[in-house]
Image (cartoon, helix red, strand yellow):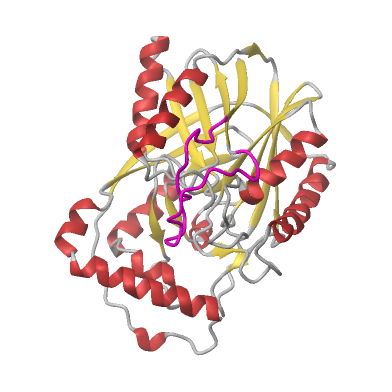
Amino acid sequence: MKYSFTKINIQAPFPTTACGHSCQTVLLNEFHDPLYVRVFSFKNDDLWIIHYSLDLLAFDLEHRDLLEEKLKEHYKDDHIRVITSTTHTHYANSVRDPKYVEYLFDLLLKETVKMEYRDVEDVTASYQRIHSTAVGKSRISGYETNNEMLCLIRFYQKENNFFNIVTYNCHPTILKAETPYFSAEYPGYVLKKLEDTYPESDFTFFQGAAGDISSRFVRDGQDYEALTKLGDALFSQIISLMNEEAERKPLKFTYKEVPIEYDHEFTPIDLSKIRSDLSEREMETIRLGQIERQKLENKASEIFSSLIRKALIVSLDIACVKFIFFPNEIFSKYMDYIDLNHEILLSYSNGYGPYVLPIDFEYITYEMFTDTLTRKTKEKIIEILQTI
């Protein structure tokens, strides 16, 4: 087996807006901390996995598919499988800027083909998981999920821990929406501390099922000082896991992908169910959601033609755990449909789509106003999650 890892700075060399909040309309060119894509790759005789973890809000399926196609052409190898994930930071260069997307795609392709591989033998991997609200918890008043999970996957060659994957499911929105600079937010902060602490190891980050989870009820501010406070708490928990012994299993890759067709509808929302105990921020976002919903309904025929119709769900089983990569902002409730002892549900991977609320969800939230997936589509999603 061969292994490679690289970290590429993906900051735009020209001003763009940030991407993640509707108020982010000002062109910015100041980076508080670097934006990276972390690329790891494992290759054996019958499978070549290349995974990108980008400090971006999203990376669409069309460009993922094109990247895989170009790499297959370059290497003349049909065994290549590309998986793209984003940390979902709301303070990165805008993926709605076509100039930046073109720049980014060319950069990814150029730097990927420069990656150098080394032989790794008898590789083992371990999987650890704890419940953690160090950075975030349910952002919906009165609704507790208990699915906030911090996971650590460690890769070893003999006793050498050469690579690690951190997964956590919480929106990187500690900073306020009007932040006047770009930032990799808490994932970037935590990864930098891990890289400094373990300079001989590589690290990457996968964002989990964070549709309903943020720092709203955990943070005590929305500046970088508040970010470091929560990031330090998460970092401490990761260090504790790094210091524990965990069962290792021989590394073995099994890759599956399942395309799914999305059906959409505008389900009426009963606004009389809005709770009286919501926070001011929740009420504000509900008002914004109503505006967005009205825009959608006013242009229903146009909007329906532009909504995502196809998505790709991918699983990568590495023996000690199976990763399930899902594109949408899926609620953590969907983690109840998988075996958390052996599986991890990830969001913002291989494309991007709006929120996926649980079936028959009773809480009126901002996310509900942009969730247009039919019940039948959600049932199909559950079936795929359970069988992929």
The residue sitting at the left extreme is 301
Q: Quadrant of residue 42?
A: top right
Image: magenta residue range = 9-34
The residue sitting at the right extreme is 243
Judged left or right of residue 153, residue 367 is: left
Judged left or right of residue 118, residue 266 is: left
Residue 343 image point, x, y percent: 57, 46
Q: In this rendering, is residue 151 above or below 285? A: above
Residue 172 image point, x, y percent: 58, 55
Q: In this rendering, is residue 308 above or below 321? A: below
Judged left or right of residue 20, residue 127 is: right
Q: Quarter of the image containing the N terminus?
A: top right
Residue 153 lies in the magenta stretch: no
Q: Is residue 282 visible?
A: yes
Give the dominant element type of the magenta stretch: helix, strand or loop.
loop
Q: In this rendering, is residue 288 above or below 169? A: below
Q: Residue at the location (40% across, 60% down)?
A: 356
Q: Nearer the viewer, residue 310 or 289?
A: 289
Q: Nearer the viewer, residue 234 or 375?
A: 234
Residue 257 image point, x, y percent: 39, 36
Q: Is residue 78 visible?
A: no
Residue 28 lies in the magenta stretch: yes
Judged left or right of residue 126, residue 86 is: left
Q: Quarter of the image containing the C terminus?
A: top left
Q: In this rendering, is residue 260 above or below 211? A: above
Q: Residue at the location (72% across, 53% down)?
A: 231
Q: Quadrant of residue 105?
A: top left
Q: Nearer the viewer, residue 246 or 295?
A: 295
Q: Residue at the location (30% across, 63% down)?
A: 372
Q: Nearer the viewer, residue 82 or 45?
A: 82
